Image (cartoon, coloured by chain):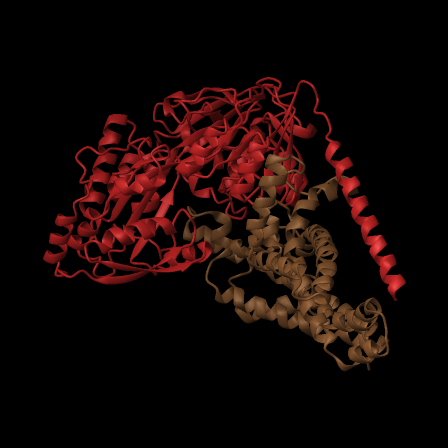
Amino acid sequence: MKAYIARRLLSIIPTLLIVGSLVFFVMRLASGDPAVAMLGSAATAESIAELREQMGLNRPLVVQYVDFLLQALRGDFGTSFATGRPVAEQVFEAFPDTVELVFWGMLIGTLVGVPTGIIAGVRPNSIFDYISRIVALIGLSMPAFYLGILLLLVFSLELGWFPVISTPKGGFLERLHATFLPALSLGLIQASFIMRMIRSSLLEVLQEDYIRTAHAKGAPPRRIHYRHALRNALVPVITVFGLYLGTLLAGTVLTETVFNRPGMGRLLVGAIQQRDYPLIQGGLMIYAAVIVVVNTAVDILYGLADPTIRYD
Amino acid sequence: MLTKLRAIRGVFVLLAAALLVGLAIAGSGETALAATRHVLRVGSGVADVGTLDPHFATNFGEYPIVKAMFNGLVDLPPGTVDLERIEPDLAESWSVSDDGRIWTFHLRRGVQFHHGYGELTSEDVVFSFQRVADPEVGSPWRSEVSNIKEVRAVDRYTVEIELHAPDPFALLRLVGYHSGFIVSKKAVEELGDQHRFRPIGTGPFAIAEYNPRRSVVLVANDEYFKGKPKLAGIEFLFMPDTATRELALRRQEVDTADGDSEQIWVDRMRSQGIVVDMVGPGNGYFVQFNMTKPPFDNLKVRQALAYAVNRDEIVQYLGPALARPLKSPVPAGYFGHTTDGIETYEYDPERAKQLLAEAGYPNGFEFEIYISEATSYLPFAQILQEHWRRIGVTMRLNVIDHASYHARIREDANSVIFYNATRLPIADVYLSQFYHSDAIVGKPTAITNFSHLGDVVDNIDDLIEEARFEMNPERQKELYAEAQRRIMAVAAAMPYAQRYSATARQPYVDLGYELIGPNRLDNLFEHYIYNEKTNILR
């Protein structure tokens, strides 16, 4: 088990180098010039060339790439073109806000999605099942930014319960107050997802022979559903949960924009628009590391849900 | 297992209850503001600033912040860009030599830099101009000081600026804007890289905090030489999403905000009791035809396309409160603008078709261009696409992101170039950047001449340069008029609209200066200027 975890964590290094290299070349293939983005549209070709020289962009691509690799191997992600500040500093500044949002979003998603999924799965084709499936379908079809604006209109503008500017600051409760609406908009969409996963997974498991055996030996339905079925039904859910967590950490940009939160999504989109190469490279590499760690954690969780899984 | 699940369920219920109680407490815990001096909250339309150093600030999110912290030797009164009304700022008086080349400025005494960086002296002024001019420093505004030969400190409070050639707009080029801001020599040298986000100025507000992607907080400089600011401070909140800015403004979570320059937005905000102001001098919208690329090397083709553009439809799209037709290469309100004697290509589709036929394209032709996805580019290309389709010309649009577009057009990739720009409101800047042959893309001195005017068709370099140094304003206006006539005669460009930026504020925000018309103010910053007189009245 320990060896397995160590191996998985060590795999971060080649993953990062591959991600970093891909980003390095893809960004340079895309046209657009960081110097133009910084100097504005009235700059002369001469001053653009000077700035490119200062940024080291006029060196041969291979030299730039080797430099970048050597720096990255030392754990140095360089400094942002746009702000002149270290990339790692900017990423670690933005990361907690995103983690906070995703954590509360996941919590809401789980609190709403798991129970509804179980009830719908245990009582398929009941009224509850129909309603929750329709609501889930709406949740899945609704773009995050649209749901976000709806929530803002109702809970901020009309009722005045929550601020429009959800930039987190202050103590725990103040932060939670500011984070609630964006977390709700993430969480509701996620709840739909989790609900549907659990429902279909449960339905499948409930057809298995051992469930029939359990029924035959006279076990009460509650015990069969929760003890025998749910645990097995959770395995695919955990997989999807892990994958989804990765996308959430990377994909909160719309929610962050609508609710005005300064997290990772906004940081990276801004960096791409500005062609801020070091920030894009460093930011995505740090992301990749987080996703590998999250997926490792999910794999370990499998073992808890399904003791037949062994790590060697 | 069942009991475990029950326990877990119990924990969830408790957690949910705690969450709700906590939220209710947090929601009621709003702190009361200080009774008399308010902090103004500004919803800024950018996601972040890249710098707060005035010699590097280039975008509309950075300008209003920098302007609140810094001064120039002279300034335009807030709310106007009228060249006649340039007034003293850090300099209390000035004189100019008979040959117009040496300007002497007498500095105000006792002006203090923020955060204890000492008194402003002639050394700081000399340092500031040298800093902008130094290629090593890399200020984007270096070309604005290219006519300055030397800046000398005569004594502690007197500065001489020697120009290469007399310049009728010398004073305008020294106002607090871009290259004209005066920084503290001591602060720049001591702070080094930190000066970027902790700049030291002399203005009514001083930097307190920079929170990346969140906000910039300024505090009142109570020692300000024009008087103690009425506000306690200003908080600029970065809010790139238009809908969020609108909701925040309606909820009074911000007091002013960058607007959305669309008529429907303006009408909606006004119906909510929010004041919307139009900020001039206005952004000129135009296309340039790349005269090196067939069939655009043919005058009749260019003229046909120009005649096919229906300016009224574009203004209708933008909204009458926000736009008006533009008929000259220099926007209205910029010194030197005229439409007298200019071929303006009033909408005439029949004439357009006839010219196309004469040019050998009776059935029109097809071409493809790159276009930016930005809302200030793509919709205009789509409108002109439709206008040109009506005369049989098909323009295919290859939509790319904004940064790529700016790179592509500088590589001379487009045959028709969509552009819009706000510049220092004098004809010289527009003409030099867009129509002087030095500015043709591909040259080391390139800026934004995409039509190749000056190399392939006509050349108005002499006119632009003569006008630049012409001290007689009447003669100067004639030269500018001639330049505009010649650009339009060869149809190097087709200007079609001039658009103002919408900026919104709560009715209780008193800017502290007069607007030039109802809901109309002119400044160079595409946003309000906040000064010592700005106040919140409630």
Residue appearing at x 26%, y 46% in the figure? B494
**Where's the C terminus of chain B, which quadrant?**
top right
Residue B420 placement (x, y as % from top left): 37, 45
Is there any visible trace of residue B433 in the rendered image? yes
**Where's the N terminus of chain B, which quadrant?**
bottom right
Note whether B260 is above or below A83 in the view shown.
above
Instruction: Give the left or right position of residue B306, taking residue B515 as reference.
Output: left
Instruction: Give the left or right position of residue B360, taking residue B148 as reference.
Output: left
Residue appearing at x 43%, y 34% in the figure? B266
Instruction: Give the left or right position of residue A27, taking residue B186 as reference.
Output: left
Residue A158 placement (x, y as % from top left): 60, 35
Instruction: Give the left or right position of residue B462, taking residue A158 as reference.
Output: left
Residue B256 placement (x, y as % from top left): 54, 31
Residues A84 and B295: in front is B295
Note whether B38 is above or below B313 in the view shown.
above
Is there any visible trace of residue B48 in the rendered image? no
Residue A73 placement (x, y as % from top left): 70, 68
Residues B324 and B122: in front is B324
Residues A198 and B422: in front is A198
Q: Quadrant of residue B208?
A: top right
Furthest toward the right, the residue is B3
- Chain A representation colour: brown
Please give the count of numbered marks on the rendered protein.
0
Note whether B199 is above or below B289 in the view shown.
above
Residue appearing at x 71%, y 68% in the figure? A237
- Chain B representation colour: red
Residues A81 and B289: in front is B289
